[in-house]
Amino acid sequence: MPFPRGRHFYNSKTAMQIVTQQSPPASHTKYNDLPENLICFSHLRWDFVFQRPQHILTRMARTMKVYYIEEPVISDIAFPVYKYETRRDNMIIITPQLPAGLEHQESLSIQKRLFDQFMSDVVGDDFAFWYYTPMALEFNREYDPSITIFDCMDELSAFKFAPEAIKVLEKELLRKADLVFTGGHSLYEAKKSQHRNIHAFPSSIDKAHFAKARGFSKNTADRVKLGFYGVIDERFDIDLIRDIAGLRPDWDLLLIGPIVKIDPAILPLADNIHYLGPKTYDELPELIADWDLALIPFLLNEATRYISPTKTPEYLAAGLPVISTPIRDVINPYGKFGLVAIGHNAIDFVNLAYEALNRTDKKEWQQQVDFFLAHDSWDMTCDRMVGLMRQEMKSSQVVYNTIAQS
């Protein structure tokens, strides 16, 4: 039985009231020919790590009202609710709050009702959908947005604890999407035959932000500092870090970021390995200014097969030499053009670190890096994405008009 369009729903099965929000966000003026509202569905918490979705959507919010819907949080609340947080103009984070003890289908049913109410009361008829997770189709597949975008930033099915249904739902999303972006060239090559309108958008860079690192005074301590920031999870090469630390106990390894999906007890411990925990995006330039080299110590497995690490150009913009394991989207283009050194084991990393520390052409290398990065930015990426959105919407309108007139 359909639920009425009102401020509250009541689910007789779960005997709980479903409230859509605490206070509705204000409406805004439509700025251009894009849809007024962009609804994004993501598997990533907005406040977890500042990465691709945050870079893109904060820029999209310059022209559209952006609602970023996270996966639900289970809490001790009595009634399900959408929690709204305004982070900046036109940028609203929505976190569904669900009570504990719900079965999967019951949870999906409540999520759908919360979403339906949100669309009715807040969004209206002028909207686009932007997906980072195909799982959101389980509660929103019935909608018909002005345009549907799938920003496929990773091969999510290869990640640890990935839902079993994700492969099937991704195929459905690829059929539904008007426009598909991929997070790197390797992922583009793997997906390009699955959609008519697919484009590679590898990791980009906020150069001005990370270039700040060059302006901070560097600690002149004798010990060499090798650093990494990012999520420490099943992609992280624990043995590589342990072996580097063992080969060079007089070097410090500084590891910044949250530890997720792995037991912290398996991480290597040594006097020269330092786990510094999560840091904010704004803190990073000053923190990494003290490093001598930056590391990309990823395993080669299914979870890293198609990744394009955002940290690669960020390290380089900060003026840091970079050593990486042979990740395909790091080898090409960064390794290919001599901007990043590629190592296969701890001995390689130590030897490459020696070379980087003792190179005599640092100024020329930095000029080469700056020239390469000059042709890339998140602003440019978003401009290209918006251009493709407008082009797709225009083409769809032409088709619609032709059909209507026939």
Image: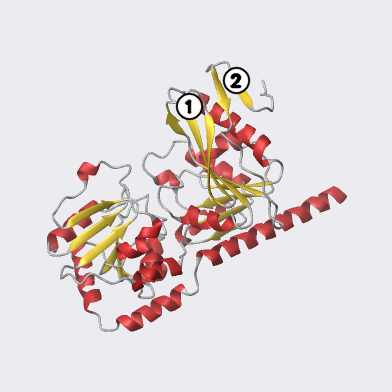
Name the side, left or right, on which 178 lies relative to 344. right
Residue 103 visible in image:
yes
- The answer to whether residue 41 is above or below residue 311 is above
Name the side, left or right, on which 76 lies relative to 22. left
Labelled disc at residue 104: 1
Q: Residues within 10 Å of mark 1 (few under 14, many from 20)?
A: few
Q: Residues within 10 Å of mark 2 (few under 14, many from 20)?
A: some
Residue 406 visible in image:
no
Quarter that holds the N terminus: top right
| Residue drawn at 64 percent across, 28 percent down | 7
Q: Which residue is mark 2?
A: 10
Tell me the colour scheme of the image: secondary structure
| Residue drawn at 35 percent across, 83 percent down | 364
Circle 2 — which element?
A: strand
Q: Tell me which corner region of the image, top left, top right, bottom left or bottom right, holds residue 284.
A: bottom left
Residue 240: x and y, percent? 22, 57
Circle 1 — which element?
A: helix
Residue 303: x and y, percent? 37, 50
Residue at mark 1 to residue at mark 2: CA–CA distance: 19 Å
Name the side, left or right, on which 188 lies relative to 123. left
Q: Tell me which corner region of the image, top left, top right, bottom left or bottom right, holds residue 22.
A: top right
Residue 228: x and y, percent? 29, 59
Amino acid beneath label 2:
Tyr
- The answer to whether residue 337 is above or below residue 57 is below
| Residue drawn at 32 percent across, 70 percent down | 216
